[in-house]
Amino acid sequence: MSSSRVFVARLAGCAVFDPAGDRVGRVRDVLVVYRRTDAPRVVGLIVEVPGRRRVFLSIGRVMSMASGQVITTGLINLRRFEQRGGEVRVLAELVGRRVDFRDGSGTASIDDVAIIEAGPGEWVVDQLFLRKPRTVPTPFSKGHTVFARWSDVAEQAESGQPQSAEQLIAAYSDLLPADLATSLLELPEGRRNEVAEELPDERLADALEEMPETAQVQIISQLDDERAADVLDQMEPDDAADLIAQLPLLRGEHLLELMQPEEADDVRFLLSYDADTAGGLMTTEPIIVSADATVAEGLALIRRHELAPAIGAAICVTLPPYEPPTGRFLGMVHFQRMLRYPPHERLGTLLDRSVEPVTPETSAAEVSRRLASYDLVSLPVVDENHRLVGVVTIDDVLDYLLPDDWRSADTESDTVTPAGSVPRRRGATLRGPSARGASGRASDGQA
C-alpha cells in the first residue's frame, strides 16, 4: 500500500477499482473515529456505487490510495451505509470546524485533512490544512493558510454543549479488547447500553468476544436487528456461533439471515456441532496454502496485523480448494520452522507430520489433552474425507476450561473446570449443513 500522504478533498470523487481492474464506484468521503490522545484513526471510505447507493469500504480492504484511484482487495459489502455513533465524516463534518491553537496563537477553520498510512491497513489523520482569519478583514480576503498537526489544535465546543459521541468513544479508544470489555461491565446497565450503541461495530465485536455469555446476550438484545447483524459479522465465527446459540431461536435465525452470507455460512457450520467438541471450539478461518507456497509467502501471511497470534503460529497445507472444507489436508508448518529455511523453500517440504488432526466430534477434553501433551497452540480439525474444516486454538480451549466468572478479579474459584456442570449445547434448530460445498463461500449481496 502506498505510504504517501493523501488529502481527503483530493480523494473525493476518485474511482474505486477491484483487483481485476473493474471500477466499482467513487469515493465520497472518509470515515474516522476519535482517539483519547492520538490523532483520529481512519476506519474506512464511503463509496458511491451504481444506483447512487453509498456503502462502507473498510480501510482494511484498501490496497492502495494513489494516482487518483483506490484499489481494493476484493468484494465490497453493498449494504447501504449507516453512520454509527463515534464515527465522523471528514468532508461532511470535520472540514469547516473551528479550532483553537494550543499555543494561544489564535483560531482557524479546517479546510482539508491529510491522512497517512501508519502501518499495514492502518491510516490516521496526519495534518490539518487550516485557514486563519485576517487580522484586518477586507472584502476579498479569505485569510492565510497554514498546516498543523492534530495535536497542535483543539476543537471549539459551544458552552453547555453535551459531550459529543466521538468524545465519548475517544475515552475507550486506546483500550485493549479485554480492558474495554471490563470497563463496559463495570458500567451500570443503562450506561453500558448507551456506550455499546455508540461504539463502532468492530470495537463492540472485540469487546463482546471478551465478555461472559450473559453480558453478550444482554448487549446484543438491546441492539436493533441490522446493527446486531453487523456486529456479529465482525466477530470471530466461533464466538458469533456461541452468542447466537444463546439467543431465542427465532431471533437467532433472523440475525443469520441478515448477516453477510459468507459469515453466516461459517456460523451455521459451527452451530451444527456441540460446544464441547472440537467442531464447536474450532475457528473456520485458519491460514491455508498449497504445498507449492514458499516460506516467504507463508511469513507474509502471518504478518497480517489483524491475525490472532494463535492462528499465526502455524500454516495449514492442503490440496485445492483452499477454503474449508478444503482438499485433502497434508499437514502443518510452524512459523519457527519457516524461520530456519530460506525464503524460496517450498512449504510442502517442511510439513510437521507428527501432529495428528482431530475430527469435529473429538471431545474438548481430548483436544485439551493433546494441546498440553505436545505443547501445541493449535490443532487441525478434519472431516471423514480428511478435508480440513478448521483449527482449534489454545485460547478457545482456555475459554472453555476456565469457570464462567474467570473475568471477575474477585472470583473465589481456585479450580479450573469446564464451564457449567452440564456440557453446553447449541440450539439444534439452528443446525446448518455438515459442510459447505467445495465451491467456497457465497457472495450474494456483494460486488
Image (cartoon, grey):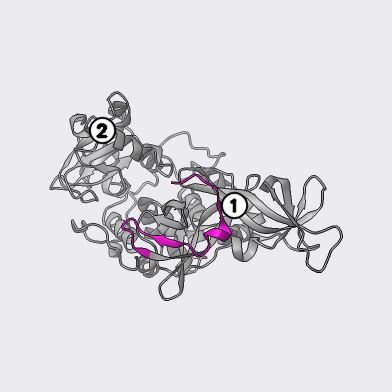
Q: Residue furthest bottom?
A: 51
Characterize the local packing of mark 2: few (<14), some (14-19) or many (20 or more) Cα atoms within 10 angstroms. Answer: many
Q: Is residue 346 left or right of residue 220?
A: left
Characterize the local packing of mark 1: few (<14), some (14-19) or many (20 or more) Cα atoms within 10 angstroms. Answer: some
What residue type is disc 1 on? Ala
**Secondary structure of residue under mark 2:** strand
- Give percent across and percent down for residue 145: 72, 54
Of callouts 1 and 2, which one flags the residue occurring earlier in the amino acid sequence? 1
Q: Is residue 304 left or right of residue 109?
A: left
Q: Which mark is residue 333?
A: 2
Reply above or below: 91 against 52: above
Reply above or below: 295 against 161: above
| Boundaries of the magenta span | 1-23
Q: Nearer the viewer, residue 95 or 443?
A: 95
**Secondary structure of residue under mark 1:** strand
Q: Do we see residue 378 in this rendering?
A: no
Which residue position is annotated with label 1? 114
Question: Residue at the location (34% across, 40% down)?
Answer: 301
What residue type is disc 2 on? Val
Reply above or below: 355 against 203: above
